Image: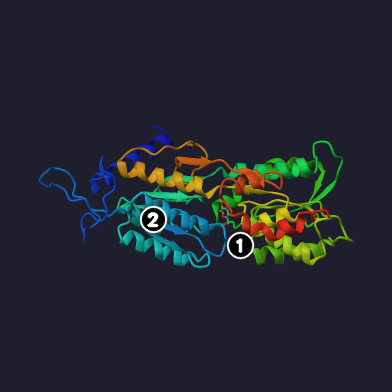
Amino acid sequence: MNKPSLKRALAFALAMFVAVSLGACGGGPKPDVESGATAQAEEGDASGGARAVFSAKIGISLPTQNLSHWNPYGVQLKSAFEAAGYEVDLQYGGDNDIYTQLTQIEDMIAGNCAVLVIAAIDGNSLTTVLAGAKEKNIPVIAYDRLIMDTDAVSYYVTFDNFLVGVKQGEYIEQTLDLKNAAGPFNIELIGGDPADTNALYFYNGAMSILSPYVDSGKLVIPSGQTEQLAVATEGWNTEKAQARFEDIISSVGYGPNGKKLDAVWAANDSTAQGVTDALVNAGYTKDNFPILTGQDCDFQSVRNILAGLQGMSVFKDTRTMVNRVVAMTESIMRGEEPEFNDAETYDNGTGIIPSYLCEPLICTVDNWRELLIDSGYHDESLFSEVLAEIQPSPER
Ligand code: BGC
């Protein structure tokens, strides 16, 4: 048996065990079937089956509420799981605090959650704590970010992270018309938090499009900061991205009247907002703003897109991933194998993790209304101020 199918077989066996433990087959999850039950299946009861031992509580561990990306996820995950009949233990790891997240996950394991859904702050820090989940046969779904070096992870639900980077790179390629224009163009790079496994996929995806132009000299990176770690932003923090970009502006001499800056690849919206603040403080306006990418369609970045300060974002409809993880959990609880659409990309060091990759979409000033407002993702009132500013006043 090859590694992925072995992994799947193990996950499936694990799921069967949990479902049997829950007595969930055919009847759906049964909350708190035995108060004070241990997490071990007890053998040899009268029916010859295992005694129900887990409550149908789902532990959800998210990184932080300080990045706006994670707030809709918390609200939507909680209400979707509750609507499906589960009890939910939702925790945020303070301000991206690894130790807080570890403790919260430990408590979820001690509290016998039936399934853990985890978006890791640091994808490399959960090996020990998740050994505890494995011991108790609690399936773990890595949510949005892959968790490394633990065989406790059964499945991974995410957006196609490499494709996110590709879409950002392609936006820069098309907007600068790199295939045809002579160049050279000046570009700078602002990456994500290297502790987050996604950051490398975003960087690699973007660079798969941009690197050939850097190699040919059509794109120049005047700061000289090119490698993933050199362009990283700890905690995806807006102020840190701003501080780094201010340094770049002054050391390279960029400015509306200085060296021309054509494009900035920012890995997501929280970092793009830091770049925007630095550029606005340096005197840039919508008339001379460089091309700037982002990701998440945070409402502040959408405002910036409408105001002509950010070129694009990548729309990752949080509702898609929430529905997917609930469906995956339900399959696990029923003892069925959840649907996945990728069994080759995400190796967490212990083998390939069967993954469901959702599709990211490009969002610009041309399609933002259809993507975000018509779909009910954002409320239009969030943008009324900027819309009033950009709309020409009615003629008398
Ligand atoms: C997510 C991005 C998000 C970033 C910071 C990443 O893991 O995939 O969508 O922008 O974390 O919150």
Q: Residue at x 47, y 45 (%)?
A: 157
Q: Verify CB contact (< 8 Å) between mark 2 and mark 1.
A: no
Out of 394 and 264, give the one closest to the viewer: 394
Q: Residue at x 73, y 50 (%)?
A: 311
Residue lying furthest right in this view? 257
Image quarter in which the C terminus is found: bottom right
Can residue 226 be seen from the camera position used here?
Answer: no
Question: Circle 1: is it few (<14), some (14-19), or many (20+) Cα within 10 Å?
Answer: some
Percent position of residue 23, x then y: 23, 46
Of the numbered discs 2 and 1, the one sitting upstream in the chain is 2
Out of 124 and 331, give the one closest to the viewer: 331
Can residue 85 be seen from the camera position used here?
Answer: yes
Quadrant hosting residue 270: bottom right
Q: Which residue is mark 1?
A: 234
Tell me if the residue at label 1 has its CB under 8 Å from ligand 1.
no
Question: Circle 2: is it few (<14), some (14-19), or many (20+) Cα within 10 Å?
Answer: many
Residue lying furthest front in this view? 396
Q: Which residue is mark 2?
A: 130
Percent position of residue 192, x then y: 62, 56
Image quarter in which the N terminus is found: top left
Percent position of residue 343, x then y: 47, 36
Tell me if the residue at label 2 has its CB under 8 Å from ligand 1.
no
Three-letter code for the amino acid on which mark 1 is drawn = Glu
Percent position of residue 391, x then y: 76, 54
Q: Residue at x 50, y 55 (%)?
A: 73
Three-letter code for the amino acid on which mark 2 is drawn = Leu
Ligand 1 shown in quarter: bottom right
Which type of secondary structure does the marked residue at label 1 adopt? helix
